[in-house]
Image (cartoon, rainbow, N blue to C red):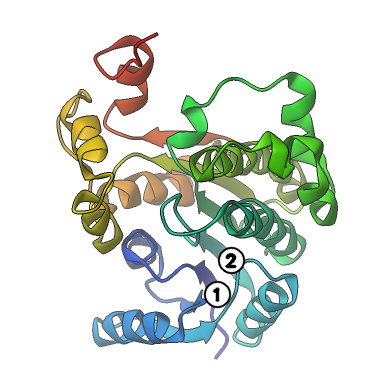
Amino acid sequence: MKKDVVLWAGAGQIGMAIARRVGTGKKIVVGDKKLENVQAIAKIMNDAGFDVVPVSMDLSDRTSILNFIQTGQTYGEIAMLINAAGVSPSQAPVETILKVDLYGTAVLLEEVGKIIKEGGVGVTISSQSGHRMPQLSPAEDEQLACTPTEELLSLELLQPENIKDTLHAYQMAKRCNEKRVMYEAVKWGEKGARINSISPGIIVTPLAIDEFNGPRGDFYKNMFAKCPAGRPGTADEVANVAELLMSEKGAFITGTDFLCDGGATASYFYGPLKPEQ
């Protein structure tokens, strides 16, 4: 019997928390570049009663993304997309961050949007970082939103001489995610489907714990200590937002981004996290 299919990219804690909220009774196809990670997380889900198939998927490669989608289609219609795949500023060089987080996300949203079923819905995980960089011009925002995917990495503002470091590359990628969601929401809407993004702050995951104990640990600890919430978040708190956006209660919400950062961005602009001039 064919089931509605959830495509889930990025076999991490946030993606799993969301999949547990929305995946009951559906076929879940989870893809990740590291096959051992995706197999392990699929076992956890299957042992909890879900129906999960692990596949190898490289978000930086269009062919790999298309194969991921086609695998999902063998089980039924694609009803949901969870994109929690990506790399962080301390994990990868500038080129990889732009290829995975910026280009890959744009391709995934574009290609799923072509085949998503009527009434379908997607959520992609962006980051608070996209909200804290200097504002781009309206023309630059439009370029990030609307440029054909295969031309994105050729944009002038994304060339090496215009990217200061890996954090800047990550911020640009996340700004592009938000703008791309707005653009793709129009396309998805033509099929009766919705797409939104969530921008988490510091969320406790195995990766975040590595960061807390690494060279940037004091920076992260200071950030969550001085945000209004006074603590980091959990994957389940991000999933709370995703569950709203992906349910009928969120039926009038599409093409937008939700900050889920404990107020860290507010503190960055108007509180104790504001950078000294």
Left or right for 71, reference 38 = right
Q: How many marks?
A: 2
Left or right for 155, reference 87 = right
Residue drawn at x 35%, y 20% as measured from the top left: 268
Quadrant housing residue 252: top right
- Evaluate if marks 2 and 1 touch, with contact meaning CB atoms under 8 Å apart: yes
Label number found at residue 79 = 2
Residue drawn at x 71%, y 59% as measured from the top left: 107
Q: Which residue is mark 1?
A: 4
Quadrant housing residue 275: top left
Considering the numbered disc 2 on the image, is that residue within a helix, a strand or a loop? Answer: strand
Label number found at residue 271 = none
Left or right for 44, reference 172 = left
Report the front residue among 181 and 170: 170
Image location of residue 77, percent across then percent down = 64, 75
Image location of residue 20, percent across then percent down = 32, 67
Considering the numbered disc 1 on the image, is that residue within a helix, a strand or a loop? Answer: loop
**In this view, which residue lies farthest toward the bottom?**
1
Few, some or many residues within 10 Å of mark 1 (<14, 14–19, 20+): many
Q: Which badge, 2 or 1, comes first in the chain's sequence?
A: 1
Q: Amino acid at mark 1?
A: Asp
Report the front residue among 190 and 38: 38
Q: CA distance from mark 2 to mark 1?
A: 6 Å
Residue drawn at x 18%, y 53% as measured from the top left: 213
Left or right for 97, reference 117 = left
Q: Is residue 273 above or below residue 11?
A: above
Q: Amino acid at mark 2?
A: Ala
